[in-house]
Amino acid sequence: MSAAGDAAPKPLFEMMAGYNQWANRRIYEAVARLPDADYRADRGAFFGSLHGTLNHLLGTDRIWMRRFTGAGEAPSLDLILYQRETGIGLASQSAFPQG
């Protein structure tokens, strides 16, 4: 970024969105290999389980996209949006459209 107060260039945001998609894909691929009991087990994290944490991350992605675009929903950060990681992963991929 340039001088304080200047808006970040679009390519920077595109690069960060691409990284977010790459990182999310890796997370969902790893989590998909876990048994359901391990996926839902309370790990002592702020949102309890991996299930709760992934739902939270999807919620934050949706909130940011609403802030950027003015469209879409802004769910509560502790709302369970999907009951399994495959739904969360698919929703996460569609949260950041390419183009």
Image (cartoon, rainbow, N blue to C red):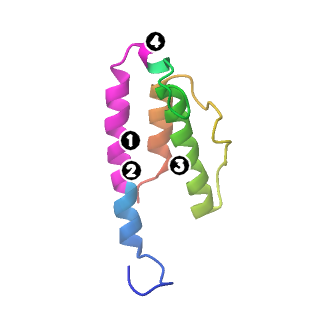
Mark 1 residue type: Asn
- Is 29 within the magenta? yes
Q: CA distance from mark 3 to mark 2?
A: 10 Å
**Residue at 53%, 41% in the rendered image:** 58
Q: Are marks 4 and 1 in contact (CB under 8 Å)?
A: no
In percent of width and height, residue 10 lies at: 41, 72
Provide the residue designation for mark 1. Answer: 24
Q: Which label's residue is closer to the chain start, 4 or 2?
A: 2
Q: Nearer the viewer, mark 3 or mark 4?
A: 4
Tell me the CA gap for discs 4 and 1. Answer: 21 Å
Asked if residue 76 is positioned above or below residue 34 in the image, the reply reads: below
Left or right of residue 21, residue 56 in this image: right
Q: Is residue 48 above or below residue 65?
A: above
The image shows a total of numbered marks equal to 4
Q: Is residue 47 magenta?
A: no
Magenta-tinted stretch: 18-38
- Quarter of the view holding residue 56: top right
* Residue highlighted by disc 4: 37
Q: CA distance from mark 2 to mark 1?
A: 6 Å
